[in-house]
Image (spheres, rainbow, N blue to C red):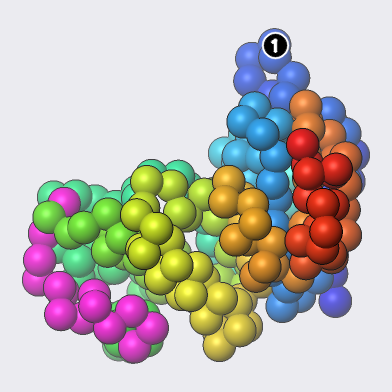
Amino acid sequence: MTMLDVIDLETGYGAKQVINGITLKVQQGEMVALVGHNGSGKSTLLKAIFGLLKVWQGKILYEGKEIQNRSPLENIREGIGFVPQGNRVFTELTVWENLEMGGYTLNDHTLLRDRIEQVFDLFPVLRGRARQIAGTLSGGEQQMLALANALILSPKLLLLDEPSLGLSPGLVNKAFEKIVEVNKRLETTILIVEQKVKKILGLADRVYILKMGKVIHEGPAKELLEGDRIHQVYL
């Protein structure tokens, strides 16, 4: 089943057009990578899908229903999660309070506690930091917390914007391990923007390469790791 269907999308900032007619699909259960040089429109596309940026032209279908220009709150309630760049956590709150904020749309406190326990099972290090102020966590731990926040509401579709940004090589591997676990164990569909191209190509099912707001390549991710294809297509 097609989870996300973007059709001839156009958008940008002010008078500057950034996305120039992008079309892509994400099937249920897939991990799909978005790669491209800086300024190619990757983050802009995620923002438009999530409702943070107005769509000028085209359509966005989620589970077959048009959602372009729907509010982020509506998208969250319908099962779309978004983790933006840069460890976006509430640095002055504890880990537990951050997770409570992640589940702010849940009116059932018992369900919220159950969801927090579920993400603690996925991220055991956070359980031991539950009462710690989030701003004192390491960069890797803050990234895990940002991901855990998005998972509190059990999203069907998770949009990830450069989750490895600013992490040390060792922490990058741990972050990707958790993302794969979310995809496989929780069966969460993922659309991920990532600059560590070879790493994400080894993990994703399919890849879209963007250049100047357009798709210049689409196909199985691992095929680009064969021979010199990544340089031929990407560079």
Q: Residue at x 88, y 60 (%)?
A: 219
Nearer-the-camera pick, 134 or 206: 206
Left or right position of 6 against 112: right
Residue at point 55%, 84% (across, down): 186
Q: Position of residue 189 (x, y in %)?
A: 66, 71
Q: Residue at x 20, y 66 (%)?
A: 95
**Does residue 126 belong to the magenta stretch?**
yes
The correct choice, above or below, for 100 with respect to 195 in the image is below
Q: Which amino acid lies under the numbered mark 1 shown in the image of this protein? A: Ala
Q: What kind of element bears circle 1?
A: loop
Q: Quadrant of residue 36?
A: top right
Front-most of 39 and 111?
Answer: 39
Within 10 Å of disc 1 (Cα), the crowding (few <14, some 14-19, many 20+) is few
Q: Quadrant of the N terminus?
A: bottom right
Measuring from the top left, give residue 144's x and y in whole percent: 35, 66
**72 lies left or right of 92:** right
Q: Which residue is mark 1?
A: 15
Q: At 10% across and 66% down in the image, what residue appears?
A: 132
Q: Considering depth in this image, is 177 or 93 the residue closer to the camera?
A: 177
The magenta stretch is 121-135
